[in-house]
Amino acid sequence: MICLTQIEYYVEEVLLMSNNYQRILCPISWSNNSMNALKKTANYTRNHNIQLDILYVIDSTILAFGNFQPEMSSQQKKQLKETYEKKMANLVQEILAEGSSMYQVHSHIRFGDPRKIICENFLEEYRDDLIVLGQPQFNHLHRALTGSVYAYVNKYATCDILTVR
């Protein structure tokens, strides 16, 4: 049985294999696995003075599914974005309280298809060297309807990828 400290050591060793990382992207879904990946990534970036981008994508494909409106109204988008901005601000405050610099941690919220936002838009804009993903926790029905973000990112991302459980 592997204990948590062994896993953290393993993650640290994998990340240290390349000292070229200057900016790391950690997309989150608020699941336990993605939050665990963020915690480990934040510790690593803090200890090695690396920029950390935390990205949450409000998945418009799920929001539109089963809804009669093809797209959300601007008021609905604004309310949803404000809700997640507050959650993200609290999350960043927790990371800063653990010793990270406010110049080191950057939070981002986007609307759209998480697969395309992560692999295309965000990487082009911020040039991250590594993506750290939490192992997905969705059921088979959800993956069949929307596709797996995890699988898409592993296939199409133009930088290194690390998966954390």
Image (tube, grey):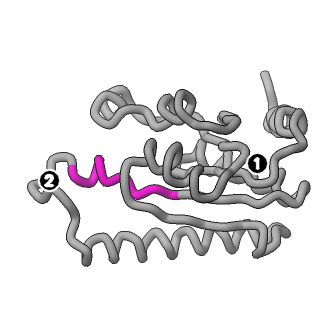
Q: How many numbered marks appear?
A: 2
The residue singled out by tag 1 in the image is: 40
Mark 2: amino acid: Asn
Outermost residue, front direction? 124
Which corner quadrant holds the N terminus? top right
| Vertical relation: 31 (above or below) 83 | above
**Secondary structure beneath label 2:** loop
The residue singled out by tag 2 in the image is: 67
> Left of 160 or right of it: where is 147?
left
Place of residue 120 in the rendered image (x, y in percent of width and height, measured from the top left): 50, 46
Q: Tell me what residue is drawn at x 15 percent, y 56 percent.
A: 70
Tell me where the magenta segment starts and ends, as one range.
Answer: 56-64
> Left of 103 or right of it: where is 109?
left
Instruction: Tell me the crowding category of disc 1: few under 14, some 14 to 19, or many 20 or more residues within 10 angstroms, Cα based.
Output: some
User: Closer to the camera, 19 or 145?
Assistant: 19
Let me know if residue 150 is in the magenta part.
Answer: no
Outermost residue, top direction? 1
Q: Earlier in the sequence, mark 1 or mark 2?
A: 1
Q: Tell me what residue is drawn at x 81 percent, y 53 percent.
A: 22
Q: Tell me what residue is drawn at x 46 percent, y 50 percent.
A: 117
Place of residue 107 in the rendered image (x, y in percent of width and height, measured from the top left): 61, 66
> Left of 119 or right of it: where is 158?
right
Point out which mark residue 104 bears.
none
Place of residue 40 in the rendered image (x, y in percent of width and height, measured from the top left): 76, 48
| Vertical relation: 113 (above or below) 109 | above
Place of residue 163 in the rendered image (x, y in percent of width and height, measured from the top left): 66, 34
Q: Tell me what residue is drawn at x 15 percent, y 47 percent.
A: 66
Q: CA distance from mark 1 to mark 2?
A: 37 Å
User: Pointer 1 and pointer 2: residues touching (CB < 8 Å)?
Assistant: no
**Secondary structure beneath label 1:** helix
Instruction: Tell me the crowding category of disc 2: few under 14, some 14 to 19, or many 20 or more residues within 10 angstroms, Cα based.
Output: few
Can residue 136 be spotted in the picture?
no
